Structure formats: structure tokens, C-alpha cells
Amino acid sequence: MYKIVKKKELTPDIIQYLVEAPLIAKKAKAGQFVVIRVNENGERVPLTISSYQHDKGIISLVAMRVGKSTALLSELEEGDSILDVVGPLGNPSEIENFGRVICVGGGVGVAVVLPIAVELKKAGNYVISIMGAKTEKVLILEKEMKEASDELYICTDDGSRGYHGFVSGFLEEYLSRHLANRENKKHGIDRVVAIGPALMMAAVARVTEQYRIKTIVSLNSIMVDGTGMCGACRVEVGGKTKFVCVDGPEFDAHEVNFDLLVSRQKIYCDQESACYDLYKKDCKCKK
Amino acid sequence: MSGKTDKGAKKEKKDRTPMPEQEPAERINNFKEVALGYTEEDALREASRCLQCKNPKCIKGCPVEINIKEFIRLISGKKFGEALAVIRERNSLPAICGRVCPQEDQCEKECILGLKDRPVAIGRLERYVADRELKRLADIGKECVYLDGNYKCSGEKVAIIGSGPAGLTCASELAKMGYQVTLFEALHKPGGVLVYGIPEFRLPKDIVRKEIEYLKSMDVDLRVNMVMGKILTIRELFDQGYKAVFIATGAGLPHFMNIPGENLNGVYSANEYLTRSNLMKAYEFPKSDTPIVKGKRVAVIGGGNVAMDSARTARRLGAEHVYLIYRRSEKEMPARNEEIEHARQEGIEFMLLTNPARISGKDGWVNSIRLQKMELREPDSSGRRRPVPVEGSGFDLDVDVVIVAVGQGPNPLLTATIKELGLDGRGLIKADPETGKTTVRGVFAGGDIVTGAATVILAMGAGRKAARAIDEFIKTGKW
Ligand SMILES: Cc1cc2nc3c(=O)[nH]c(=O)nc-3n(C[C@H](O)[C@H](O)[C@H](O)COP(=O)(O)OP(=O)(O)OC[C@H]3O[C@@H](n4cnc5c(N)ncnc54)[C@H](O)[C@@H]3O)c2cc1C
Ligand SMILES: Cc1cc2nc3c(=O)[nH]c(=O)nc-3n(C[C@H](O)[C@H](O)[C@H](O)COP(=O)(O)OP(=O)(O)OC[C@H]3O[C@@H](n4cnc5c(N)ncnc54)[C@H](O)[C@@H]3O)c2cc1C
Ligand code: SF4
Ligand code: SF4
Ligand code: FES
């Protein structure tokens, strides 16, 4: 059992949980994830380790309520426990001093890109962050992102704050402005890390491909075990089948077959929504 | 059986006692066990067939050399408890082996009766005595043979990685010797293939659970959710004071065929399909939260137990047609005879000498599979006749789910974290078959991670041998 020591609503739908998991906290690195199971009948759900406190034995998870499992999780209160938490899974992010790096986060993806931005900054990079959300009210972890970045830009789909539009749109403008202005190659962009919904990552990949900037994305395929045992999480990268849980979760964005990712994410849509509706009928949660 | 009474008492006495089973029409609608188990009368009758041979060949056929002749003699004398004790000397999981051993290739293959008639149903008898004990315990309100009082292990610490049959057996043997055993398991439930792979209708999970309760009563420290290599490395285990490590991580990495269309929605590895259904109880969805695609027309590729289990699971999930596609003929099928027979009774449609060439789909979902007829040529390195495609024999089959059950390999997650560990070309750990010793001092390995996908009883045998070797290593310090 893994106790929730603190729970915080970042938005009505995105909730941060500080969870006691001493062994995982000790080993966790940026980019890795855990698989949780809320209760005995529960699904195994992958969630990124958004931050970790090695000494306190605590990891932070940020989960968006999208279906039954994340709703069940959101019903747990401080002091309650999650039945199973297993990790750290997946490969850690590649952290080096690359030079100038852009970190792009969309929606709950901001929570996933945050630990990577933190580590990149520690490694000496100049970190430019772009974070986006549907509207100002649902922007998350702004303060934390600001601390981790040398420059921070905010985008909202409805224009209620910052750039009016998608993060990929802002990125495109930023790159064209920035790269056109510069006389010498010194201030190029050495790497982009983009994490968010699959369609956002695909859009970012299309932008950076034009500029030939190495771009890393973290793929959120459907998973079961998270240890390479089932193949549920398979994606196509560079024309080859890869397992996100053991070969990833991060891959070279320009090699990823995003259409396949998007399509495979929809396998259980109908079943999941039926399950969620059934649950909502007699559930205490607000929705 | 009763229909044959007119054939005379002598003949009847010779016939192998059939296993009471759920009717096919009924069982395809549930996940309850198919084989119901012998009654006492059945068991006595079957035991009476045994000739009590001077030179009992059956024993040689059993990989762990259970004294079969003796336990059958004890059954005949209604000494069921003693019969179980004889089995337990060699096999700590009889309720499981009695159900899933490929007896026809092992003990029963050697039984002398098999020459003229059908061999003694050794597996069914083994299951009977084990089940009888479980029932006796249940009647007095116990789950398993809890060791009474406070069983405490105070010996040296030993770590076991993986809780399949190899790990479970090694753990119980070492605990009996007084070692402090920690059993690390990656999944949230212990049991390995016994819980995530083999379906409920063939091996009720309650039986596995009881075996695990027994281990716990022996003071074995069971730690689930521990993906070793990630959360702890083998080096760290030694640093924490463990004197030896037994690796029993199985062969859980699913193979695909590398044909076009394999990543379409609706295409599963057998591992995923069975894990969803067994471990995650997807057959109870939405009561359980894990979904599974319930096809109407399902193709299963392969001819082993894994393929049979997948096909029979698909049937129970409501498929109208389940095609079992295997590239050789039935004779070469590696599945247990009983499984093949049960699959046929349940209406699984066998398409033998057939192989998939590609999978096609619409809007991301599989809708048909292109198949090819095969013919068998001269034997290949495995000794089985090699299938080759018959030219121009391609045809399409409409399906909405495809399950790939063409074998599994070793998972490199753990082995990749210890560079000194010797592996073979396939990634299996090199270990001495008698002791389980690997190329790293203090590290032993056994079960599917050493042999490649094999059987429950072989994995258990490896666990037993390793336990003895670990004991010797810790006592003598000799490697
Ligand atoms: C490596 C990895 C890291 C992730 N990190 C985070 C995170 O930090 N925060 C966060 O909010 N989400 C994260 N996700 C996504 C998260 O796992 C899913 O949102 C969650 O499983 C949905 O479960 P549900 O039952 O609430 O919704 P469901 O009703 O199951 O599904 C709603 C939709 O979510 C998607 N989904 C369902 N199951 C999964 C699954 N097992 N994996 C991925 N997507 C799924 C499907 O598109 C589905 O239509 C991550 C996914 C992966 C693979
Ligand atoms: C569907 C199916 C049906 C079968 N039917 C039969 C049958 O009828 N009869 C028969 O005799 N055999 C059968 N087999 C084969 C038999 O189940 C295996 O040979 C046997 O289970 C191997 O035992 P094992 O202990 O080596 O490994 P497994 O049973 O595979 O157990 C390995 C365990 O190690 C865990 N693990 C893996 N990596 C790690 C890690 N890094 N850290 C911690 N834990 C880890 C796994 O999660 C798993 O629980 C079948 C196999 C399958 C898949
Ligand atoms: S363990 Fe298996 S092989 Fe040995 S006697 Fe029992 S059923 Fe036969
Ligand atoms: S070989 Fe067959 S008949 Fe002979 S002792 Fe063994 S089980 Fe009995
Ligand atoms: S989640 Fe099962 S292999 Fe990746």
C-alpha cells in the first residue's frame, strides 16, 4: 500500500498526489513512470513520476481525470493508500548539456516535461519552456516551470492568457523569429522535448522537422504490465515495432508513426466510456 | 463408461477411468474449471489398474521422479494422506501438476499399460489426492497446510526473483531449510504464468493462491510490484546481505511474426490477451476495470498450450468462430493432447498446414487475414518436419481479432543490468542444469529463463535443484 501524503487540485480535473514510495523515490529519474492500480478490480494505469524527493521517500504523480481509473484515483483522500505502485519503469531521459533546449508541454503533459526541464537546467542547458492549455484556468505548474526555465512562454487555445493558439503554433513562430534573427549559429536550438497529447506532439514534430532540430517525445500508449511482457504498448519508430514501456517512453519524434499511436490509443474508447458512465451513475464525484 | 458394461467385467476393468467434465455446450459460457476431478470411486478404480510393476517405468518419465508406484498403492489402500506425502517428497505443487503436466509425454508415456491399453491416469490421481487434502483442510476451516505456531526462519538471506513455479518451489525448499527467503515479483500478484497465463478454466486461481498462502506461513517474505533490475539490482541485493540470488524470471517476452498489419487494433500477443483475461479479469468487464476486445471471428496463430488457451478463452468471451491456425499438422502440435481435444469439443476450428502472410485492416482495425497453405518437407534442426508455403494457395479469412501465440523469449529487463551474467544467443541465462549455477558467483538461475519456454514441472525441478545447490554454496562457500 502506498499512502497519499498530500493531494492538491491543480485544476478541477488535474490532481497532484504526493505518494509515499521510498524505494521508487530513491531510484527515480526524470522521464520514468510508474504503473498504479487503485483497488482490487482496478486497471493498471501508467503515470509519469512528475517529481521525486529522494530523501523524503516521496514521489509526485499528476493525473488528469479522463476515465474510470483516474476518477477512482481522484476519490482517494490524503491518508488513503493506492493499492499498487510499481516502478520506476521505462528509460530515464537523456540528460546532458546540449546547449539551448526547448521544453514543450501541453495540458497534463506539463507535469511530465517538468522533471526533464529541471534536470536539463541542472545539467547547464539554457532552457526555454513553452506550456499550453485550453484556457488560463487550467494551466498547471506554472510556478515550477518558471523556476526550471530561463524563458517561459504560455499559450492558451482560447487566448485567455499568453499566445492565442496551440503550442506548436507558437513554437513555429518562435523558431522562425529566433533563427532568422541570428547571424551566427551560436544561438541555434539544440534540442526540443515535447510532451502532451499525441496530436500536439505530432504537430511539434512537423514544425521541428523543417528546422532539423532533434526532437524527443514521450509516448503515452496503452499499457498493461509496463515491463515488456505483453506488447500492448507497441508503436512504430523508424519503421520498426518498439515497446514504449521498455524501449521508451521517449523516442525521436521524427521517426514516430503518430497515426498508429493515435489509432491504437482508441482501441478501448467505447468500452472505457461505457465503463465510466456506469461508474458515474452511482459515484460520489462531482461529475 | 457405463455404456460399456456389456463388454464384460474384465475389459471394463482395463479401461482408463474417464475424467468427469463440464459439458462443452455449457462450459463455453463460463470460466469455471472444465475437468471436475475424480470421485473417490473413480480414483480407487483407476488406481486398481496399476500393475505395481517391479521395474516401474513411469517414475523415470516424471521429471522430478515422484514415486508413482507407491503413491498409487497407497491410494488403493485408501491411505490418501500418505499418498500425498509421497508425492510431496518430490513435488510441492501436486494440485497444479496433476492438472497441467503434459503427462502423455512424461510419466504416462512410460507407463507399461500404455503398450497395450491406455496408461494409468497418473496425473488425475495426483490431482485427486491433492484436491482431497485441500477439501479436507477447507472442511476444517483452513486455507492450506499452515505451519502451526510461529514458523521463523533465521538462516542466511536468499533472494529469489520471479514467483512462477521455479521461484515458488525454490522458495519453499529454502524456507524448509530455515533460510530467510525474500521472493520478488514484478506483477501485483504472485504465481507467474500460473496466474497470468494459464486460464481459470484449466487451473483455478484459488489453488495457486493457497500455495502462496502456504509459502507465507513459512515466513517467506513476498514482495510484489518489484521489477528487479529497475528497483533493485543484483549487486544491491548482495550489498544488502543476501548470500545468494536465484533468478526465475521466466520467458515472458512475446514474439510477433513480423508480418504486415501486426500492429493493427484487434491484434494481440497471446500474453496480452491472456493477461487481460486472467490476471486483470477482463472477462468480468465492466465489473473489473480492464477491457478486452471481444471478437466475433477470432484467429489464433500457433499450436502450443498458449494458442489453445487463447482460442478457448476467445470462445468463452463470445466468439462465434475461433480459427486455430497452425503451420504444421496436428501430429507436430506441441500442446497437450487434452487441450487439443478440449478445444475441438468446444468448436475451435483447426486450420492446419496454414500460415499467415499478412493482416489487413480498415480504419485501423483488423478485418481480414491472408493465409497460405503449407506442406511439410524434410525435418529441420528441431527434428520436426519443415513447413514450406504451397505456391498460389493464398486465401483471405474475415476476422476481427487476431491472437499471436508463436512463442515467447526471455525478457532482458533484468539480465541487461548485470553485464557479467553469461547469456546464450537467444538471451537465455547460461546455467548448470544440475545446480543452476550461472557465470556469476552466488547467482543461480532456473526455469524458463534458462531453458526457454518449457513446462511447469521442469521449472519446479530446476527450483528444487537450485535450492539444494544454494544450501551447499552458503554452507561451504564453494563455487
Ligand atoms: C508512459 C506513460 C505516462 C503517462 N503519464 C501520465 C501522467 O503523468 N498523467 C496523466 O494524467 N496521464 C498519463 N498517462 C496517460 C494515462 O495513463 C491515462 O490517461 C490513463 O490510463 C487513463 O485511465 P482511465 O481509466 O482514467 O481512462 P480510460 O477510460 O481508461 O481511458 C480514457 C482514454 O485514455 C487513454 N488510455 C486509456 N488507458 C490508457 C493507458 N493504460 N495508457 C495510456 N493511455 C490510456 C485512451 O486513449 C482512452 O480512450 C501516461 C501514459 C503513459 C503510457
Ligand atoms: C498460456 C500458457 C500456458 C501454458 N500451459 C502449460 C501447461 O499446460 N503445462 C505446462 O507444464 N506448462 C505450461 N506452460 C509453460 C509453463 O507455464 C512455464 O514453463 C512455467 O511457468 C515456467 O516457470 P518459471 O517459474 O520459469 O517462469 P514464469 O512462470 O514465467 O514466472 C516468472 C515470473 O517472474 C516474474 N518476473 C519477470 N521478470 C522479473 C523481474 N525483472 N523482476 C521480478 N519479477 C520478474 C514474472 O512476472 C513472473 O511472475 C504454459 C505457458 C503459458 C504462457
Ligand atoms: S509431476 Fe507431472 S510428470 Fe510427474 S507424476 Fe505428476 S503428472 Fe506425472
Ligand atoms: S508403469 Fe504404469 S502400471 Fe507400472 S507402476 Fe507405473 S503406473 Fe503402475
Ligand atoms: S505495457 Fe506490456 S509490453 Fe509494454
Image: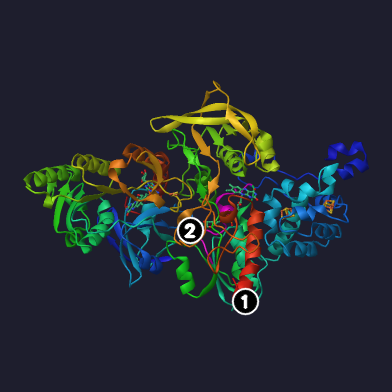
Label 1 marks which chain's residue? Answer: B
Judged by its main secondary structure, the magenta piece is: loop
Element type at mark 2: helix
- Looking at the image, residue A185 sits to the left or right of residue B96; the answer is left
- Looking at the image, residue A197 sits to the left or right of residue B139; the answer is left
At label 1, the amino acid type is: Thr
On screen, residue B317 above or below B470: above
Q: Can I make out residue A68 in this image?
A: no
Quadrant (top left/top right/bottom left/bottom right) for the C terminus of chain B: bottom right
For disc 1, the marked residue is B476
Q: What is the x, y in percent for residue B277?
A: 53, 46
Q: What is the x, y in percent for residue A284?
A: 37, 55
Q: Is residue B192 magenta?
A: yes
Foreground residue, B263 or A240?
Answer: A240
In the rendered image, residues at marks 1 and 2 fall on the same chain: yes
Foreground residue, A271 or A33?
Answer: A33
Element type at mark 1: helix
At label 2, the amino acid type is: Thr
Q: Can I make out residue A73 in this image?
A: yes
Q: CA distance from mark 1 to mark 2?
A: 27 Å
Q: What is the x, y in percent for residue A180?
A: 8, 43
Foreground residue, A268 or B331?
Answer: B331
For the point 23% across and 39% down, the residue is A206
Q: Earlier in the sequence, mark 1 or mark 2?
A: 2
For disc 2, the marked residue is B415
- Looking at the image, residue B61 sits to the left or right of residue A46; the answer is right
Foreground residue, B312 or B430?
Answer: B430
Magenta segment: B183-201
